[in-house]
Image (cartoon, rainbow, N blue to C red):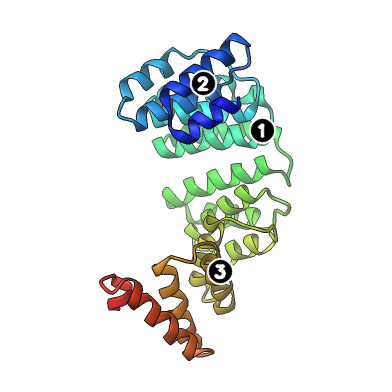
Amino acid sequence: RLLHQAAAARADVQGLDSALQQLEARQAATAVHHVALWDTLADQGRPDDAVSRASAYDRIPTAPHDAAVLAHGWNRLGLRSRALDFLREQATAYGPAAEVWRAYYDLLIEAGIWSELETASAKARLLATRQDALHAETLIARLHMAVTLRRLSETREIAADLQPIENLPPLTALRAAAALRRAGAPTQALAVLQRHHEDPLPAAWWAEFFACAHASADIPAMKRAIEALVRLEPDSVRLQSNQAALLLLTGENPAEAARLTLAVHTRAPRSPEARL
């Protein structure tokens, strides 16, 4: 396993293949190990080899995480129908595992298969409780469908059901916030994110936090998000420029805004941020 991880980090096809053979000999290979090799082959200009291997894979994973990784792996290689067939047949076998149903919903949304999304979400609701991640992921998928199909009353109803759910895993909370913001409810989206205080939260979290705060015209929340993003990406010209603009907007520290603006201009004088 360690050899496989090291080979994956190096994008070493030969190393991955060798480690995978050793894992197979020990009956310890999972779908995750196979998908890593397919992805590396595709990234290195060998998509036909990747698709050939992926098409030949016919095992049913026992772990929900492996099942979700397998479905996404097939989809990335253009084998969406294979991934959907697998999830149609096996999703309920994984019970209320939100990761599997999330993968199923994402593929259906990507393909625009709304009738099947209705059917799948109805099945999932029989497995979910009112406060678990599966219930939230089901509402997120239905909200995306309602917004896309412009079902305004349904959009409002689902948004009202989604926002109060507490104790969501960070990824589900992030997805819920993005869905609520897309549905025109940025204040509710921001409320979902503000319940989480894990440290550290990733840049994607704070980027969504900033987007929700900006859409809500919540200046303190915008400032909090920009400060967190700059800590995570201190060399980002774009973020330093945004921080300077926010300081100018609030008027609270013009000297720091000037310092940041000069730093942006010095580091990247031809960038759009510097010209602006």
Circle 2: is it few (<14), some (14-19), or many (20+) Cα within 10 Å? some
Q: What residue is drawn where x is 58% and y is 53%?
A: 174
Side (left or right) of 193 relative to 210: right
User: Which secondary structure lies at badge 1?
Assistant: loop
Say which quadrant the N terminus sits in. top right
Q: Give the number of the disc on residue 86.
A: 2
Residue denoted by label 3: 225
Q: What residue is drawn where x is 41% and y is 38%?
A: 110
Q: Which one is nearer the viewer's eye here, 132 or 230?
A: 230
Res. 32 in view: no
Circle 3: is it few (<14), some (14-19), or many (20+) Cα within 10 Å? many
Residue denoted by label 1: 97
Q: CA distance from mark 3 to mark 1?
A: 31 Å
Q: Nearer the viewer, mark 3 or mark 1?
A: 3
Res. 36 in view: yes
Q: Position of residue 158 (x, y in %)?
A: 59, 52
Side (left or right) of 27 relative to 80: right
**Which amino acid is tagged 2?**
Phe
**Which amino acid is tagged 1?**
Ala
Q: Which one is nearer the viewer's eye here, 65 or 38?
A: 38
